[in-house]
Image: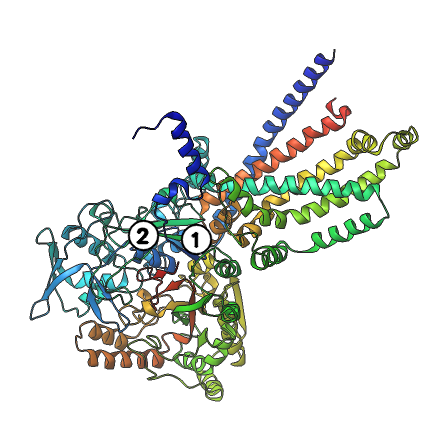
């Protein structure tokens, strides 16, 4: 019976995931069309930038023709769409490198930074929120509230410089900048990722701590919790299976939103800590009007947003079985 | 001696736990780490200008000739060369021991094709190619260049210290059309690129070219012996200026390309044993005026604007520390061989206002200014220009744009109603504009000139005379006359100079004081 129920549940989740992915196709297509049109309409000429100051108008025109920028909107759009269907996202106008290769080179750093930051923020944010809620009104609660307000208010670059000053320049415990892949140097990876993760994670952690605190305090007031306390259940047994499972949905929603915000917030941290990630790639591409790179990264980002939201939606069913139905 | 299994394992274990173990036999590699704001996305020396491209080009490629700090030309890849009495035929012979990084020998044909490719894009190269009637190899190591019309700067052109660098490249790359950038970095210079260890957006790795045979003369800028005293060079992209300096002070990098002016006190506070300024490159702050559209198609209005500009205001806006910016009247750069103050205007607002009144200009028409936003140098200069125009009675329509939009819009020769403009400002490196044939800013051939499109036939004739003049003293006279014409016609306005300072850690010795950061001659203290 249980197996049958579980199988039904898994089938429902799979069906739901496929539906969401199919529904994402028109969303991604619309995003792609908007990106393409905006870039087409945006002022600035990549051919003039690539040709440089020394180029004559004839040289710039020759480049424009070679890059296909002289074609009409619809011709360029058709070429781009057909290329994407072939899995070809084009070649960077400036480096001459295939865009997918550029993205592949950069995605590991951003993914590593985002994943480690999320784990750090969820682990500490939710824990602090729970402790604050359980000791609501006490010293710990007030300390968590004050610190989360401070961390949430500080811009990332200020946090970054303070951390660099303390841990790199004064104590000389950690490096100022750089990134090394964990495949190349596992220990080096952790040493270099700590400060960027704390910088990126502190506002996220603060947000999660406050949301967790508020939600747990609300759940704590429910009758079933009061009953559990009256029955004499130990705190950990009340907190984890009863309180947290019921408080989870707003927290998971906030984690999803936070991950989405990390994708955009990562640019500042990648710049300050010189991490070769996707954020910096797209900023450089925008400044140089490197259209193929901008188009590819923006499409990728919209896809990640959709997947993150889908994962969050699916996770609801684990905490609230009614949603499965 | 034969080892049994137990003895072998024992020795291996001991080697593993003793620090250094088996590694004692390996020599420790010395590495120089150079921090820069952005790695060059295109490294073709014949294709792109820019300080990063130039830095990489000089490390990887070699040149036929080079200049020293006195702008004297010395042979570099060339061993011997002769010039005919009528100065129309040049014969060059390459020196022995020149090899490309793929081990193939450098041939005269490679060099001929490289000169042709560079000459199809570079401003000076184009002049050389226009004057050249014959350029071809005469043997494996020799080639001839015959001029069809007089050109006095054949050797100086090939020794050009600024972009586009007249770098020599193997035939297969030199045959690439000039409109298509070469993406491989194969030269014959003192450093070899290691693409498999380089990472986009993070680092470019080079190793010492152990096959490179340096010249015997001492190094001076790009001339003389390019002796490399370390094994590996890493160019590390650090976009944030503060992080660059922090990384240097923390010992993570050894040398940084450009110090932000507000960070100088931090360097000075640490003392030269930690970090010190080693060299600087200079940029001229340039205001371009659109000569094709009113009101600046009127010479009186241009002169009024020129008289109203106060260079001291400009340099104060660019940098509060005088170590980073200075007034300079010399069209071809202060400290350069053709430095002069001839013809320079003296700031006089009363005269400027009188000229405006005399011109009868319609002050109700706004001046369209293209202003690059968030550019640490361009934005303040643009703001001072707008303020100056307002003091003259104009209204200014500041159109704030990013650099890509600026690069595109400034090419528009049309009227304001069709997206045109009246004034804009930029910078040029003085090492790349030190003579009338190199400087784009002094071109005055109308719609074929640099944006702003000034027209002055007298100046063009003087430039032509300069290109044909061998006598150094006469060249100086001509540059003075050209400068006077530039100011008289207000072809463009040089409004000061900004210095870009490089900083090295105290570990580095013998860093060359040059406008490009060269990596030879440097030694690293252990």
**Distance from label 2 to label 1 (Cα)?**
19 Å
Q: Chain of mark 1?
A: B
Residue B300 in the image, given as x and y percentages of width and height:
41, 82
User: Same subunit under labels 2 and 1?
Assistant: yes
Q: What residue is drawn where x is 38% and y is 57%? A: B52
Chain ID at mark 2 = B
Q: Picture quarter containing residue A162?
A: bottom right
- Which quadrant: the C terminus of chain B? bottom left
Whether residue B299 can be seen here: yes
Q: Check the picture and name the quadrant holding the N terminus of chain B.
A: top left
Q: Secondary structure at mark 2?
A: loop
Q: Viewer-proximal residue, B228 or A34? A: B228
Badge 1 element: strand
Q: Is residue B140 left or right of residue B230?
A: left
Q: Who's the residue at 21% across and 66% down the image?
A: B217
Q: Dot 2 corresponds to which residue?
A: B44
Q: Position of residue B380 (x, y in %)?
A: 51, 70
- Residue at the farthest right position: A230
Task: Please tell me whether mark 2 or mark 1 is closer to you in this view.
Answer: 1
Tell me: residue A135, above or below residue A226. below
Q: Which residue is mark 1?
A: B236
Q: Residues within 10 Å of mark 1 (few under 14, many from 20)?
A: many
Q: Pinpoint residue B214: horizontal percent, then vertical percent.
A: 22, 58
Q: Nearer the viewer, residue A285 or B140?
A: B140
Residue located 78% across and 33% down the image: A244
Residue A33 visible in the current orientation: no
**Residue that sits furthest to the left in the current view:** B85
Total numbered labels: 2
Residue sitting nearer the eye, A196 or B416: A196
In the visual, does B491 lie left or right of A182?
Answer: left
Q: Earlier in the sequence, mark 2 or mark 1?
A: 2
């Amino acid at each position: 019976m249980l197996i049958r129920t579980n199988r039904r549940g898994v089938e429902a989740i799979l069906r739901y995931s496929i539906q969401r992915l199919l529904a994402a196709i028109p969303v991604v297509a619309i995003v792609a069309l908007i990106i393409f049109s905006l870039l087409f309409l945006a002022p600035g000429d990549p051919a003039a930038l690539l040709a440089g100051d020394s180029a004559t108008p004839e040289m710039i025109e020759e480049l424009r023709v070679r890059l296909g920028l002289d074609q009409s909107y619809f011709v360029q759009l058709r070429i781009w769409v057909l290329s994407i269907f072939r899995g070809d996202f084009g070649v960077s106008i400036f480096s001459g490198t295939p865009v997918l290769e550029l993205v592949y080179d950069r995605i590991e750093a951003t993914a590593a930074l985002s994943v480690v930051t999320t784990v750090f923020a969820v682990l500490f944010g939710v824990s602090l929120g729970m402790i604050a809620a359980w000791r609501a009104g006490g010293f710990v609660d007030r300390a968590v509230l004050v610190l989360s307000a401070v961390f949430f208010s500080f811009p990332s670059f200020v946090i970054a410089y303070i951390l660099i000053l303390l841990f790199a320049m004064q104590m000389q415990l950690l490096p100022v900048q750089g990134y090394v892949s964990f495949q190349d140097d596992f220990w080096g990876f952790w040493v270099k990722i700590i400060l960027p993760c704390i910088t990126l994670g502190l506002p996220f952690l603060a947000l999660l701590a406050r949301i967790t605190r508020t939600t747990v305090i609300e759940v704590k007031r429910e009758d079933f919790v009061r009953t559990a306390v009256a029955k004499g259940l130990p705190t950990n047994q009340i907190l984890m299976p009863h309180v947290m499972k019921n408080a989870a949905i707003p927290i998971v929603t906030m984690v999803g939103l936070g991950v989405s915000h990390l994708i955009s917030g990562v640019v500042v941290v990648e710049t300050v800590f010189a991490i070769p990630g996707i954020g910096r790639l797209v900023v450089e591409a925008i400044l140089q009007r490197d259209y193929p790179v901008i188009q590819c990264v923006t499409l990728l980002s919209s896809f990640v947003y959709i997947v993150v939201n889908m994962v969050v939606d699916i996770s609801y069913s684990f905490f609230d079985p009614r949603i499965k139905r | 001696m034969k080892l049994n299994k137990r003895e072998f394992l024992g020795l291996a274990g001991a080697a593993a736990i003793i620090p250094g173990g088996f590694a004692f036999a390996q020599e420790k590699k010395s590495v120089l780490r150079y921090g820069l704001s952005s790695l060059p996305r295109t490294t073709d020396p014949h294709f792109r200008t820019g300080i990063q491209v130039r830095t990489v080009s000089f490390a990887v490629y070699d040149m036929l000739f080079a200049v020293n700090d006195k702008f004297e030309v010395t042979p570099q890849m060339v061993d011997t060369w002769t010039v005919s009495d009528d100065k129309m035929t040049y014969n060059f012979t390459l020196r022995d021991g020149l090899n490309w990084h793929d081990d193939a020998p450098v041939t005269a044909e490679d060099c001929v094709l490289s000169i042709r490719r560079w000459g199809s894009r570079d401003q000076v190269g184009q002049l050389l190619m226009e004057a050249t009637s014959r350029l071809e190899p005469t043997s494996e190591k020799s080639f001839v260049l015959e001029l069809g019309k007089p050109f006095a700067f054949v050797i100086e052109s090939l020794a050009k210290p600024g972009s586009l660098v007249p770098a020599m490249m193997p035939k297969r790359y030199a045959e690439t059309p000039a409109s298509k950038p070469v993406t491989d970095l194969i030269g014959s210079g003192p450093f070899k690129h290691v693409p498999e260890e380089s990472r986009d957006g993070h680092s470019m790795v080079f190793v010492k070219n152990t096959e490179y045979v340096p010249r015997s003369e001492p190094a001076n800028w790009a001339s003389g012996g390019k002796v490399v005293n370390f094994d590996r060079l890493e160019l590390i992209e650090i976009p944030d200026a503060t992080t660059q300096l922090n990384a240097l002070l923390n010992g993570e990098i050894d040398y940084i390309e450009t110090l932000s002016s507000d960070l100088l006190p931090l360097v000075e506070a640490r003392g030269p044993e930690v970090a010190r300024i080693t060299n600087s490159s200079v940029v001229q702050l340039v205001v371009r005026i659109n000569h094709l559209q009113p009101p600046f198609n009127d010479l009186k209005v241009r002169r009024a604007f020129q008289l109203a500009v106060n260079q001291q205001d400009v340099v104060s806006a660019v940098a509060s520390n005088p170590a980073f910016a200075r007034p300079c009247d010399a069209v071809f750069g202060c400290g350069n061989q053709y430095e002069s103050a001839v013809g320079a205007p003296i700031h006089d607002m009363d005269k400027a206002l009188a000229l405006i009144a005399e011109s009868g200009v319609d002050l109700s028409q706004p001046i369209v200014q293209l202003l690059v936003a968030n550019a640490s140098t361009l934005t303040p200069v643009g703001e001072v220009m707008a303020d100056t125009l307002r003091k003259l009675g104009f209204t200014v329509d500041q159109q704030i744009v990013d650099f890509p939009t600026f690069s595109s819009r400034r090419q528009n020769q049309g009227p304001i109603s069709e997206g045109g403009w009246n004034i804009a400002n930029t910078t040029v490196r003085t090492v790349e504009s030190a003579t009338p044939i190199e400087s784009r800013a002094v071109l005055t051939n109308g719609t074929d000139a640099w944006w702003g499109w000034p027209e002055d036939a007298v100046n063009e004739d003087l430039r032509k005379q300069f290109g044909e003049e061998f006598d150094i003293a006469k060249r100086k006279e001509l540059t003075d006359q050209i400068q006077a014409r530039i100011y008289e016609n207000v072809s463009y306005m040089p409004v000061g100079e900004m210095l870009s300072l490089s900083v090295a850690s105290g570990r580095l010795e013998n860093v060359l004081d040059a406008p490009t950061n060269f990596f030879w001659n440097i030694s690293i203290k252990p």
